[in-house]
Image (cartoon, helix red, strand yellow):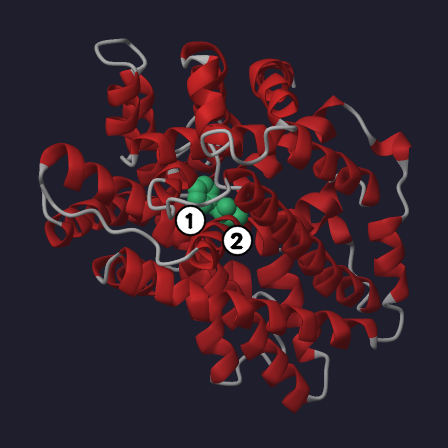
Amino acid sequence: MNKRENFGSRLALVLAMAGSAIGLGNIWRFPYLVGQNGGAAFVIIYIVSCFVLVLPIFMAESIIGRRTRLSTFGAIKKLAPGSPWKWIGLLTVITPLLILGYYSVVGGWSVDYLWKACTLRLTHNTAGLFPGFISSVWEPLIAFTIFLVATAVIILLGVKNGIEKFTKICMPALFVLIVGIVIYGLTLPGSMEGVIYLVKPDFSKIDAGVVAAAMGQAFFSMSLGMGAILTYASYAPENENILSSGVGTTLADLGFALLAGFAIMPAVFSAGIQPGEGPGLVFDTLPYIFSQMPSWIGAILGIVFFLTILMAALTSSISMLEVGVAYLQEEKGIGRVKGTIIITLIAWVLGIFCSLSFGPLAGVKIFGLSIFDCIDKLCSDWLLPLGGLLFTLFVGWYMSKADVRDEFTNHGTANVGVFSVIYFLMRYIAPVGIVVVFITNLVL
Ligand code: PHE
């Protein structure tokens, strides 16, 4: 049996979890969803979802991972031997692969845009640049491949030398970079309108669709429902307080999403652009804004901005790859190198189809959606919430309350007072919340 690696410290664990959570979901998805769903009203529902729905599921995954010290499939098998619950394990082998494929395509866009920024191609007319880029064949494919290989290299280095070291460097850097962008954005003329848009709620904009979108985004952004948090928790140091790492990760993720909103909306309003632009907001709109600035400022800001996105995306993609690699290592006895190559290759093939679905394969529609949109929707609206539902039902209803309490409270030494609140949220509120999201998505 291989000796299992663990994170070296509590800080390393929280940084790795925050690294997984903070990613394209925060910088690319959150701002455009805010823009499409009515600004501050969406933000408020999002914040509530983070604590009522997402935190209990985060706890459920942490409890399973730390209790068993195994990756998802083995963990469920160990806690529920011979029961059909093992199928959760299968789900969490498939979902990360699908996500890794399409997520790496967007990761590739950030590689390409960083390169464009470095070669000063974002400092002059950028009209039509983004649509032209994503619909071409080779450039996005090459960038996507570079992103995926970079992810694989970090995973090959291992939990301590790869994941831990990389996130320890990137996370503080990310924070500094985004704060710098926020400060600069606020100095732009007309930027206050963007701030007001983010803080002044218009409750007339809220309907069931907005609530479902906010909950789904909270799920995706916190990396829940596919075993990433479970796997990281299985590497947690013995004395780790699960509640504080969960709250710490939730606050970091939420804080970063808000910072990304404050980095982007003021600039969008200052340039007189509509915030409801959609997925192109970051890749289409921001380069336009950079190109309108004095060229040296636009160049520096472009480099800083796309470097931020790239680092955030990598600290998330490694957590997706790790789930599959840990599974192959522990369940199939396949070594880390071989396992990494296998999973990377499958994600690569999937990603090729996703990338080409903006160009030559644009005509291929599944349920009326392009391949990319279909996988995005399938994962974030269905598979991740389904995984989360099963995890929370497993801990809330299948595991014995005594075991859950024992793990959550570090054998009765911590968090004893809040246990009943979290347990109630895990047993009732989180499952009901997810079912409501499902029904809303079905009806809308
Ligand atoms: N949370 C990541 C982000 O916000 C995406 C992610 C989803 C990572 C699911 C792992 C698992 O970008």
Q: Is residue 403 left or right of residue 428?
A: left
Judge by depth and name the residue closer to the eye, 389 or 210. 389
Categorize mark 2 by other alpha carbons within 10 Å: few (<14), some (14-19), many (20+): many
- Return the residue nearer the eye: 347 or 219: 219
Residue 363, picture quadrant: top left
Residue drawn 25% across the image and 20% down it = 77
* Residue 103 - label: 1
Residue 82 percent coordinates (x, y): 21, 10
The image quadrant where one finds the C terminus is top right
Q: Which residue is mark 2?
A: 24
Question: Quick check: 400 above or below 58?
Answer: above
Residue type (three-letter) at the residue carrying disc 2: Leu
Q: Amino acid at mark 1?
A: Tyr
User: Of the residues under marks 2 and 1, which one precedes in the sequence?
Assistant: 2
Quarter of the image with the N terminus in it: top left
Q: Give left or right: position of 376 versus 101.
A: right
**Mark 2 vs ligand 1: CB below 8 Å:** yes
Left or right of 288 in this view: 98: left
Checking the image for residue 309, the label placed there is: none
Label 1 CB-ligand 1 distance < 8 A: yes
Is the Cβ of the residue at disc 2 closer than 8 Å to that at disc 1? yes
Residue 189 at x, y percent in the picture? 88, 75
Say which residue appears at 38% left-offset and 46% top-offset. 236
Which element carries disc 2, helix, strand or loop? helix
Q: Position of residue 221 (x, y in %)?
A: 55, 43
Asked whether residue 288 appears in the rendered view, the answer is yes
